[in-house]
Amino acid sequence: MIYTLNGILTESDVTSSAIVVECGGVGYRLTVTANTLTSLPTPVFTPDGEVVDDVKVKVYTYMSVKEDGVELFGFATKDELDAFKLLISVSGVGPKAAMSILSLFTPKKLAFAIASEDTKSISRAPGVGGKTAARVVLELKDKFEKAFPDFALSGTDTVRPVKTDAVDKTKLKDATDALTVLGYSRSEIAAAMKNVDMKKPLEDVIRDSLAALMR
């Protein structure tokens, strides 16, 4: 099984979200996420199609073998590869749906969304509906926390759902609903609220959360 490719980036196609990496004279075509595509350098070509300078890259890979063919998927980081493997372990989530989710979310942001049970944001990925998003949250909430210790929910850069046993549940709901109307996702709102004093009046909670969201 091919785990990584270290070679020259000879093609980068935004339309099909694919790249070609040449290793030892062999060009490997990989389907990549939008996040990986934007993180990689763009090769420069001469008018006749030759690469001006060798652009060396390293990508992590996953090989999908099916009856109708073999496909290589590429990832800029091991975290993205690990997140992909977890996603395709969910019932009903195939490689295409997993790539769609990881094109919308970085692994860290996906961990945020799953931790805060933000199925609405996850379902925005093309080809992923509400039921699939709900399964992702249900089946991966614990696995993501274990698989990504750097994204542990106690960290300052992660989202931990606001503990409702210590705050007014009605206030929390009203503030969240008000911020949702402004176009923010529930994972973004949860991140903004983690340092907000929930004992303040509702108006202050909304104002403080909005200030955090706008930073």
Image: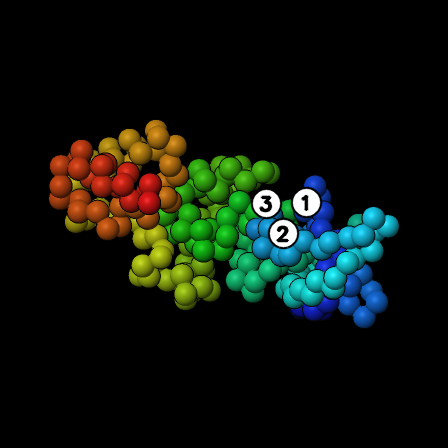
Dividing the picture into quadrants, the one containing residue 200 is top left
Give the x, y percent position of residue 104.
53, 45
Q: CA distance from mark 2 to mark 3?
A: 13 Å
Near mark 2 (Cα within 10 A), the count class, few <14, some 14-19 or many ≥20, is many
- Residue 114 screen position, x and y as percent: 42, 50
Residue 138 makes an appearance in the image: no
Disc ID at residue 37: 2
Q: Which residue is mark 1?
A: 14
At mark 1, the secondary structure is: loop
Select label 1 or label 3 by which is in front. 1
Q: Which residue corresponds to the image point at 45% horizontal and 40% vertical from the top-left?
A: 121
Rounded to the nearest whole Å, what is the CA distance between mark 1 and mark 3? 14 Å
Q: Are marks 1 and 2 in contact (CB under 8 Å)?
A: yes
The quadrant of the rendering that contains the C terminus is top left
Q: Kindly state the secondary structure of the residue where label 3 is placed.
A: helix
Quadrant housing residue 177:
top left
Would you place residue 48 above or below residue 1 in this image?
above
Identify the residue under disc 3. Answer: 100
**Quadrant the N terminus occupies:** bottom right
Q: Looking at the image, can residue 201 be seen?
A: yes
Q: Are marks 2 and 3 in contact (CB under 8 Å)?
A: no
